[in-house]
Amino acid sequence: MPDSRPPRTPHVSVSDRTTEGNRTGSWKYLHPEYHDRVAPCRERCPVGVDIEGYLSLLRAGRIDDACDLLLRENPIPAVTGRVCDHRCEGGCNRAQLDGAVAIHAIERALGDRVLDGPLPPPAERRHAESVAIVGSGPAGLACAYHLVRLGYGVTVFERDERPGGMLRQGIPAYRLPRPVLDREIERIEALGVVFHCNAEVGRAPSWPALVGAFDAVFVGIGAQRGRRLGVPGEALPGVRQGLEFLRAVNEGGHPDLGDDHRVLVVGGGNTAMDCARTALRLGGRGTTVTVVYRRTREEMPAIADEVADAEREGVRFCFLAAPEEIVATHGHLVVACGRMELGQKDASGRRRPIPSGEEPLLLEADTVLLAIGEEVSLDGLPLTPRTEGGIHANAWGATAETTDGRVGVAVFGGGDVTGDERTVAHALAAGKRAAIGIDRQFRARQGVMPPLEPEALRIGEQGAPSMTRWRGDDPIRRVAPLNEVVRPRDINLADFARAPRHRDRHAVSRRRSWSHAPDGFAEVNLGLAAEEALAEAARCFECGVCNECALCMLYCADVAISRDPAGRFAIDLDHCKGCGVCAAECPRGAIMMSLEVPS
Amino acid sequence: MKKVIVGNHAVSWAVKLARTEVISAYPITPQTQVVEELSEMCASGALAARFIKVESEHSAMAACVGASAAGARAFTATSSQGLALMHEMLHWAASARHPIVMANVNRALGPGWNIWADQSDSLSQRDTGWIQLYCETNQEVLDSTLMAFRLAELVELPVMIVLDAFYLSHTSEPVDIPDPVLVDRFLPKREPRFRLDVKDPHAFGALVRPDDFLEMRWHLQDAMRRVQPTLERVEDEFAALFGRRYGAVESYRTTDARLILVTSGTITSTAREVVDAAWDRGEAIGLVKVKLFRPFPAAALRDALCGAERVAVLDRNLSPGVGGIFAQELRAALYDMPPEDRPMVYGYVLGLGGRDVTPQTLEDIIDRTDDMGVPDRADLWVGVKA
Amino acid sequence: MSQVLVTDRVPERELMTAGHLACPGCGGALAMRMVLKELGENTVVVLPACCWSIIAGPFPQSSLKVPLYHTAFETGAAVASGVRAALDLRGDTETTVLVWAGDGGTFDIGLQALSGAAERNENILYCCYDNEAYMNTGIQRSSATPWGAWTSTTPARQPQASPKKDILAIMAAHRIPYAATASVSYPVDLLEKVRRARATRGTRFLHILAPCPPGWKFADERSIDMGRLAVQTRVFPLMEVEDGTRWRFTMEHAGEPVERYLRPQGRFRHMSDEDVRQVQANVDERWAMLERRTTG
């Protein structure tokens, strides 16, 4: 009797199961994925340091690991922490909130800690090949460092009495103390790199001797010749190239600044700032230093901090003025400077200075230092020059020898001798790039295919090559990494607490009573103390990298994010509706929404 | 223990004896004494119940629903406008199968305001799924209320006990108040099949699609079908302890009656007198009292009325467009009889809004019925002033 | 520490399951998840008609791991009163009786029962998750709809003309021991308020703003952002009221221009610059009044 048989349905609406059987995941057309992406600081660093990586190691209290990660890419962090223009900070997403992380100061603190530690043991020699490095500036030092760590034999040939190149000859001690530089080089030497100083390749040893003795050569001779002004009076006594002046001081000399110690420095780059501040220190009380630059402050290529320090120390600036003639009179010099105004942009992207038609400026000086750029001199080296000067280097750092009929050894180049941007960081990167190129070529000769092409080594779209990627042994666990850079719009500032950026400590910087005593060249910028550096590291957003803050899990209205036993986050795609809240709320852009592909 | 009490207090006594746990009520004439007395009982500690003094009848029934859902024995009382306001929640209580007991004092619905006896309020809730029991005396009120709790909890349906405004609610009668010890034997503690329990969590009342709704209504109807046999059983138990029973339907001197009056509520006691007087005169007039209105005791009424020529149904209520409701339901029940056994039904609408129904009124109805052939309308009105 | 680590202060247990039927990005679903995390297993939920009547899942499902009673629209607080009485009689005075109602079931049709329960100081926790319209039935206006908003019954040509009913003031007028506003975008604040509410006896009222992507017409992923903007623009200040008399703000409100909150929402798209200025003026006025209340 159908009417009297009780149905299976219960007598009331009462639940007997959860909603988990509803596969609400079918609603979505986007789903979230965790991807470690590239922090902008990493892309911006010309050396290719995994800045975000070592900052996160510091937060975890793994200081030694942080140092190791830094040293994988950058051989001389105590140097770069002091002299690099830290353009990494220009990309720091924290700037949107309360100021970029003071990466330079943290790098310096780590670099100094490394210097305070023991010397490293010699690197393991794994390959028979050996490489000659010509020039021991940052490019050569980096190439030597990376090659010896890759297991090759490395010998450095340096023309000067002591290694360091522009680091020693060009950068003054108050920016880069000599003991720091010496210790950095000592560390490289301890790895097993052999240094020959007072050895000018092309003369002794000769180029053929060199290429006969080694399996590859890296040329990092820099750009040592100051560019000439090309105006009447340039050859007068008292007018000299700034680089020469700096070299003389850095070698312990005490160049004469003339009777009244009036110094004019022509140029707007770092060399000009170095000359100006060195002259101040050298000359002592009564020295006046004026920097003459043909554009304005905004266009100066010098590091902004350097300009600010120079100003603080009393250097004067004369903008929109370019020397047209130098005359000697009554025991001093008069520099006639044409007045300039800014016209259209030129190839460098800066507005071109054009004569404004005003009366020329007449500046009196006892010493005129020219710091308007450096040129490459290839004397003695049979290398194919570029029309712009210097030599060419391809994506792997390889360059071409001159053809003299001989099949030569592989020649690589990098740094100021090539068309690279002229900074210490770019030179370090070029040395690394060439080391990778050399390693690749050696493996190719043995029939071992290289793991990656240069584009794949590049961090982000525009970043430097990564040695870690070349070696394939990233010590940091990455979650589905993508070579994409996290932009400001990927960051969610809402959950960050404000914490102002730590400021570098400065030695008291006012016009001091100059003397020849070394105190005048004592270091001016003292960076951050160790605890402050660690606190500053804690300000890092960790852009693009999941740090398990678990906000995604908290804000998921669908309970679709959970932690697996390994502690990693997992998305339950059967129930995730693709709302995108997790990706939008992730403070650091570690979650991306991906389009569903219908199967 | 015998006490002379008004009908409202008879309700109160029963609620107390039943160890009701949650009472939630809103005052309305002529119900107020029910809850006033219960307030006293709670305040004095005689009754260990929570009394929620809600802000409307709708909330009163809602609170009962909540209390019942959480496993408590719940009660409320109301009348007329209040009952109408509760309408939505009456459906809710029944569909959720909560064994709530409610006393409704039959009062007319306005406008115009009318506080006197009229059954239209309770009868217009006849489709809500509530069991409805109508009472003739204060004793019956008390007894029915006690039995209501038992019945409700056995079939898992709410029960409405109905008593006439003023004729019962405010009229004192001697009532035998049962021994609490015996009541405890009659009415054990409530053991709900489901309740809100953090140790066994469920969701109740969630959306039911067409796939399952029909079946749940089937269950509801099935429970209604079990009411009559269960009521009999309950009355057996009650009678065994207290010596009284009422039956879904009571036949009074209907043997060989040619005309049977069908009544409910207090009109029944007037009808008894008139029936006795009729027999004294030698007229075969009988009376059938309908106690159980929902579920409608169709079979019992067919049995009770079989053989009579005429049936005069006395409806102190009106369903506009139909006429008297008992008459309507009765006609439907009698339709299932063979036509030759079917008596002629005369549906009288009377006593609305408290209009007095006297023995004379009933005598006149009997005469009028005797004189009438086939009634020309379903609703025959009594006492309309020309 | 750079980031405020909120998750340290969030209980781990989940009393809500996946597979519920909320729209993607639903603020109301997240609100329930957060509140139940704090309240725990000893909770009975009374659920009058609202979006959650559907979100909870149809028979025979439930997306909650605590007992749940679906009830008629206007009865939340009344049914809860009955549940409370029954539990107390059983000797259980600790289980929280939680009413989980939308704005319709609180501000409008449910207001009477709520007022009654509050006047009786029923020992219940009443949570209104407010998405500012009758969303479940298709975005019709309620008295919680803010001035100027589009809804399906206040179309763009004739948008909502009355201001949002001040439910917090209404509840404060009942002198209940604890009332507060909260936002899912400030989980620590919300959980702290749930904690405080739980520790209080009597009627406790939480008014939680629940951003609604389909109803307010913004992209799903901005749900938390909307809840944040509502607070920072002072449109929905986060406050507590004790015993109906002691008012206080529970966080700083930056006072961002209301435009930042209004413009991303399609329900305000028809607003002219003058309308926006009017909203700003209204917000400023109310803020000034609230400031007086919190200091006076």
Image: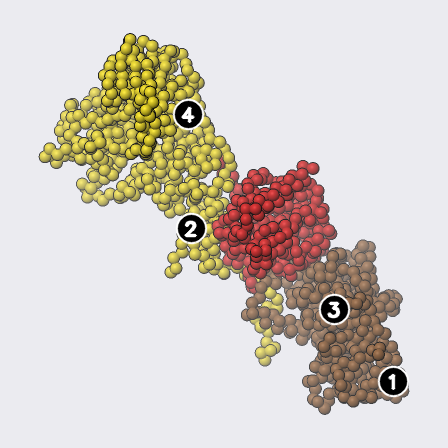
Chain colours: A yellow, B brown, C red
Position of residue B334 relative to residue A192, above or below, is: below
- Residue bearing mark 1: B278
Mark 3: secondary structure: strand
Instruction: Classify 10 Å Cα crowding around label 3: few (below 14), some (14-19), many (20 and above).
Output: many
Q: Residue at x 50, y 38 (%)?
A: A496
Amino acid found under the numbered disc labelled 3: Met
**Circles 2 and 3 on the same subunit:** no
- Residue bearing mark 2: A593
Provide the chain ID for the residue under circle 4.
A
Mark 1: secondary structure: helix
Provide the chain ID for the residue under circle 3.
B
Q: Nearer the viewer, mark 2 or mark 3?
A: 2
- Residue bearing mark 4: A527
Residue C259 shown left or right of residue A196 in the figure = right
Amino acid found under the numbered disc labelled 4: Gly
Instruction: Classify 10 Å Cα crowding around label 4: few (below 14), some (14-19), many (20 and above).
Output: many
**Circles 1 and 4 on the same subunit:** no
Q: Earlier in the sequence, mark 2 or mark 4?
A: 4
Mark 4: secondary structure: strand
- Disc 4 to disc 3, how far (Cα)? 87 Å
Residue A315 place in picture, x, y as percent: 38, 18
Q: Is residue A50 visible?
A: no
- Disc 2 to disc 3, how far (Cα)? 59 Å
- Residue bearing mark 3: B160
Q: Residue at x 28, y 10 (%)?
A: A329
**Circles 1 and 2 on the same subunit:** no
Question: In this orientation, which residue lies closer to the viewer: B238 or A506?
Answer: A506
**Circles 4 and 3 on the same subunit:** no
Residue B44 shown left or right of residue B126 in the figure = right
- Disc 1 to disc 2, how far (Cα)? 91 Å
